[in-house]
Amino acid sequence: MNFDGRDIVSIKDFSKAELERIMSVSDLMEPLSREGSDILKGKIMATLFFEPSTRTRISFESAMLRLGGNYIGFAEPKLTSVEKGENLVDTVRVVENYANLIILRHPLEGAARLASEYVNIPIINAGSGAEEHPTQALLDLYTIKREMGKIDRLTIALIGDLRYGRTVHSLAYALSLFDVKLYLISPDLLKMRKEVLEEINGKIEVFQETDLKKVLPKLDVIYMTRIQKERFPDLKDYELVKGSYRLSRDDLKFVKRKTIVMHPLPRVDEITFDVDDTHHARYFKQAFYGLLVRMSLLSLILGGIK
Ligand code: NCD
């Protein structure tokens, strides 16, 4: 198993053993996340974000600093030559000269794959349109493992925007390597993409539902998502489905004692604030695990950890 210099374009590029390795290195990162280290001293990471981000960009930057490296980049392409018409390939070919790896978020599906074909340094996909968000799936898996003690034999529901939400695409692919039951709960308009269903059907048991309340008592993991307003070609459709699911403290009366509630964040109105201080809520913990998983990935890919 060799991660040295590897791209992370799709979660589908990983075997189950590789996912387990990334998670066990994430465990080792917890003390370093507090004390710091110089594992990646002298290395530079470029964060190129063509779409808004809070957690993904900042947790990657924090991960790099905790490992003793540095970062450069932009969070707003309007201030760069992209505004003058520079294309993505030219941008990454130039940045390749200034950094040891690139973290890329872009509105176009296939953007990370394209970039990886033109540069020799590793490209990490931090979100490619509605397609995939592989590092989010890694931290989601890690959260389930840490908080439930296992991934196998759990019943997990992905809820909300399964059509335009990239995190649920990557997470569904990743979960299909484990022994889980997967409920896909969405309005009809926002059903899971066909290409994802084709990939996971047959590997795990998959149930498609529209009613969340009905399945709540069966679930070990409730993974809520935001309806991705910005990706709707027609805002009239958004109006039809906005606010489809809203998980509140009252709903949690019907779940198992150990059930956890996750969300990639940002939340809009899918989880009411009164859930935050229940023992089920894990979304802020999940954001912390994102730091550990990103430290793990940077260490493995830039050769700090063999
Ligand atoms: C997600 C994204 O960008 O896809 N955010 C994140 O990275 N945690 C989810 C979202 O925007 O709804």
Image: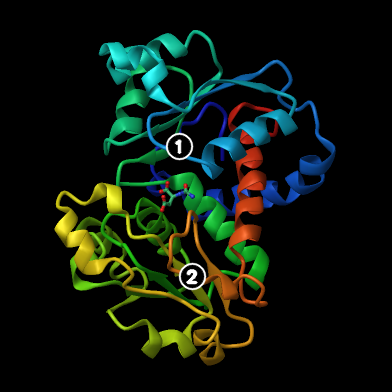
Circle nearer the N terminus (2, 1): 1
Q: Residue at x 35, y 11 (%)?
A: 81
Instruction: Report the side of 94 relative to 194 (left or right).
Output: right
In this picture, is 25 found above or below 214?
above
In the drawing, what numbered circle is on residue 8? 1
Q: Name the colour scheme.
A: rainbow
Judged by depth in the image, the label closer to the viewer, 2 or 1, is: 2
Position in image of residue 247 (x %, y %): 46, 76
In which quadrant of the rendered image does the N terminus lie? top right
Point 62% across, 65% down: residue: 145
Question: Would you identify the image quadrant in which residue 198 lies?
Answer: bottom left
Quadrant of image for the C terminus: top right
- Any atom of ligand 1 within 8 Å of the CB at mark 2? no
Pointers 2 and 1 in contact (C-beta within 8 Å)? no
> Helix, strand, or loop for circle 1?
loop
Tag of residue 76: none
Does the closest atom of ligand 1 sit within 8 Å of the Cβ of label 1?
no
Q: Amino acid at mark 2?
A: Ile
In the drawing, does residue 86 fall left or right of residue 73?
A: left
Residue lying at the far right in this picture: please name it. Answer: 35
Query: As displayed, is residue 108 above or below residue 114?
Result: below
Q: Could you tell whether 84 is left or right of 5 in the image?
A: left
The image position of residue 146, as x and y in percent, is 67, 64
Mark carried by residue 271: 2
